[in-house]
Image (tube, rainbow, N blue to C red):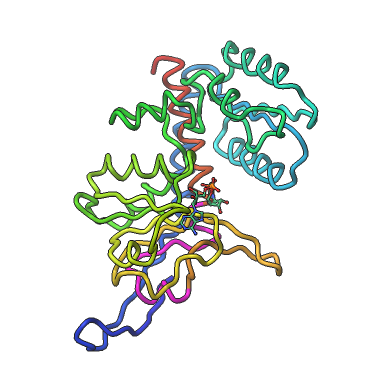
Amino acid sequence: MTIVGKVRCCNNAPMTTKAKILDGKALAGRMREDMRSEVAQLTEKHGRAPGLAVILVGDDPASHVYVRNKKIGCENVGFASFSHELPADTSQQHLLGLISELNQDPKIDGILVQLPVPDHINPETILEAIDPNKDVDGFHPYNIGRLVARKPALRSCTPYGCMKLLAETGRDLHGLECVIVGASNIVGRPMAMELLLAGATVTVCHRFTQNLQAHIERADVVVAAAGKQGLIQGEWIKLGAAVIDVGIHRRDDGTLTGDVAFESASKRAGWITPVPGGVGPMTITMLLANTVQAFKTHIGE
Ligand code: NAD
């Protein structure tokens, strides 16, 4: 899909831009197809399929949907998936006990605890209890540290997926001005480390940033992950920039949208991700890729 718009450049001459759509759904489909054949070969060679354990505590409806999609994704590529659905009043001790068992279980290559966990459970304690070699979400401080130290092991799935989408532009990121909006542990911060590793000049904006617009206006790459619907106005986008929209918001009519004003941004950007169908499918795909990687490490492939 291509969106064509007319803009005027600095000398006021009309200019036409064509924002190419970075189609995460299609890319994820291709990657999963490749993974399916690799997993079939690995399973035949080693006598078992990669195993992913997914733990869900409580009954948050959105979390149930995410876990179901991850389970379907696992089964589609030929993994063995193990679901642990625990009641909301599960104690932290009990959860730590389950993680310890899964850490020791030879059939399990990846462990994922769906966030958020109920308030009486400390998410950091839980994430740090997972064996870093089975941390397929890439959230463990060991794996974050490996990325910081330029020796990535298991990488955080959403930023990793954003890097795959940026690779689709064919642009060399060395020296480009990349602006990330959002500084969370699971998206903004590891995204900054990914882009730095790729040689970009990186700016991280957050809730205390002054004049967000000025940062966006000079960005060759924008990664929007503030969790604020329509925060990034299309008029702010530099002509030809690559725009990756991580945000997910449900409108009143049930449709999904992101942090970027898509229609107006498409008239200035060189590339843009849609919501849905951009970053979302890539996040689950990178979780699957991490599980294959963890399996190979586990069996010494
Ligand atoms: P978060 O709430 O943990 O972090 C948001 C960050 O944005 C914070 O660092 C905050 O300082 C910053 N921020 C908030 N308002 C801002 C503003 N006005 N200007 C600049 N910065 C601002 O959120 P998160 O978990 O990182 O998720 C961000 C968004 O990405 C959410 O919409 C979430 O649903 C979505 N998400 C999508 C995927 C996916 O696979 N597509 C994965 C993870 C998160």
The residue depicted at 26 percent of the width and 43 percent of the height is 198
The residue depicted at 19 percent of the width and 86 percent of the height is 11
Residue 1 falls in image quadrant: bottom left
The residue depicted at 67 percent of the width and 29 percent of the height is 55
Q: In the figure, 207 relative to 149: above or below?
A: below
* Quadrant, the C terminus: top left
Q: Residue at the bottom extreme?
A: 13
Q: In the figure, 297 relative to 264: above or below?
A: above
* Residue 278 image point, x, y percent: 48, 57
* Residue 158 image point, x, y percent: 47, 44
Query: Would residue 149 be found to the left or right of residue 301 on screen?
Result: left
Q: Give whichever of 71, 201 is nearer the camera.
A: 201
Query: Would residue 137 be found to the left or right of residue 13 on screen?
Result: right
Q: In the figure, 220 relative to 293: above or below?
A: below
Q: Give whichever of 226, 70 is nearer the camera.
A: 226
Query: Would residue 112 be found to the left or right of residue 87 on screen?
Result: left
* Residue 15 image point, x, y percent: 26, 84
Report the magenta residues as a range: 263-279
Residue 5: in magenta span:
no
How many numbered circles does the render carry?
0
